[in-house]
Amino acid sequence: MKIGILGSGAMGSGIAQVAAQAGHDVVISDTSKEALDRSKSKLAKVMARLVEKAKITAEEASETQTKISYVTGIQDFVDCGLVIEAIIEKLEIKQKVFADIEAVVSEDAVLASNTSSLSIASIAASCEKSERVLGIHFFNPAPLMPLVEIIPAIQTDEKIVNAMRALITGWGKQTVVAKDTPGFIVNRVARPFYGEALRIYEEGFVPEGPAGFASIDASLKQLGFRMGPFELMDFIGNDINYAVTCSTFEAFYYDPRYKPSLTQKSMRDAGWLGRKSGRGYFNYAEDVEKPASVASPSLVENIGWRILVMLINEAADALYLKIASRDDIDLAMTKGVNYPKGLLEWADEKGIQHCVDTLDNLHTEYHEDRYRCSPLLRRMAKNSETFYGSEEM
């Protein structure tokens, strides 16, 4: 099967590399010839590094590169069995290009979007054969990150879902299936990692400034997370993370669980975007040392647990609302964002009743719907159940 990729940015180029290394002929289309040239040049460098590290042979590197062609139009998608769109996150633009691509490809071709949060149903609605449209969400960098979310719209034919999951699994990826709701699995469940950390900072539980950010980061690292929330927001970019938070908040009809932070807005407004601007929550100048945690060990422990229980609550609600299966939720969080263990498994270890009690205490203190306990957790605590005590979940 020939694979079409719309968009030659980092994500589109990465997906093209994965497909080509899996043996497919690939067509990358972009309106910018310069962008295509950059994509081709970057792939050559990536292949050279892989050869240097003895990950692949020189012959394999050459073969991968020859399998990819670079074009400025979409007419070359004509004989592609699958086209994956990886362009700007603007619904109206995606809808237009999907309608344009459908006019070019065969009736049997599958059309997929790599969107991380937009409605697949809305994208599919732009096509006459909406049943062949679905989401195939890779994580950046696509060649390295093992997880891919498969998102059927309500219109998507189940046979296509199964076929695409089998195809992407054959590319060496681990796939999960998510309901077409804002953020799917990973970007939905992970919101408290940032949002609750910002809330704790704004409440003054830690010192102001970088020392406070470092203290909260330390609390999560003690639990096994590779990066703390402020390090990670600086790595992602505070403009990007803030925009995703705002769009998620709006998409969930202003549910207070996803409320944006004024602290992060200030960072965005000041141009303190993180590593890419040289300053964010931390200063990345060469002569500036990163501050150490200044909170007491007990406080750090309590901060970490408060953020973790909010993540567990979000994962439990995703299962309760049938966003995905138990196994897919835990797999998504360990393989998509490198959490040290699955959140539902973690809930069992900490104790379901302990999770419910913590959330109820927070709700009692704040009287905010933000801290409402998932009905699933409450029901499980009442019945002394665990997530992994039953294989039926």
Image (cartoon, helix red, strand yellow):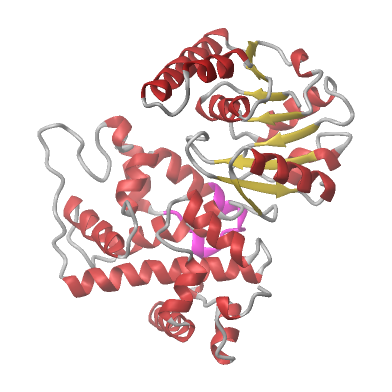
Residue 21: x %, y % from top left:
58, 27
Please report the residue visible at 81 percent of the width from the left and 43 percent of the height from the top: 160
Does residue 149 appear left or right of residue 77 in this picture? Answer: left
Any magenta on residue 171?
no
Please report the residue visible at 45 percent of the width from the left and 80 percent of the height from the top: 355
Where the C terminus falls, by quadrant? bottom right
* Residue 188 location, quadrant: bottom right
Please report the residue visible at 66 percent of the width from the left and 54 percent of the height from the top: 178
Q: Is residue 129 above or below residue 356?
A: above
Q: Is residue 190 above or below residue 84?
A: below
Residue 199: x %, y % from top left:
35, 62
Question: Can the viewer see residue 370?
Answer: no
Q: Nearer the viewer, residue 161 or 257?
A: 161
Residue 387: x %, y % from top left:
56, 76
Any magenta on residue 254?
yes
Please report the residue visible at 40 percent of the width from the left and 68 percent of the height from the top: 308
Q: Is residue 25 above or below residue 315?
A: above
Q: Which residues are magenta?
A: 247-260
Q: Nearer the viewer, residue 170 or 352?
A: 170
Does residue 357 appear left or right of residue 23 in this picture? Answer: left
Question: Can the viewer see residue 70?
Answer: yes
Does residue 328 appear left or right of residue 266 in this picture? Answer: right
* Residue 361 location, quadrant: bottom left
Residue that sits furthest to the left in the current view: 287
Where the N terminus falls, by quadrant? top right
Residue 234: x %, y % from top left:
32, 42
* Residue 111 location, quadrant: top right
Q: How many marks?
A: 0
Does residue 199 appear left or right of residue 110 in this picture? Answer: left
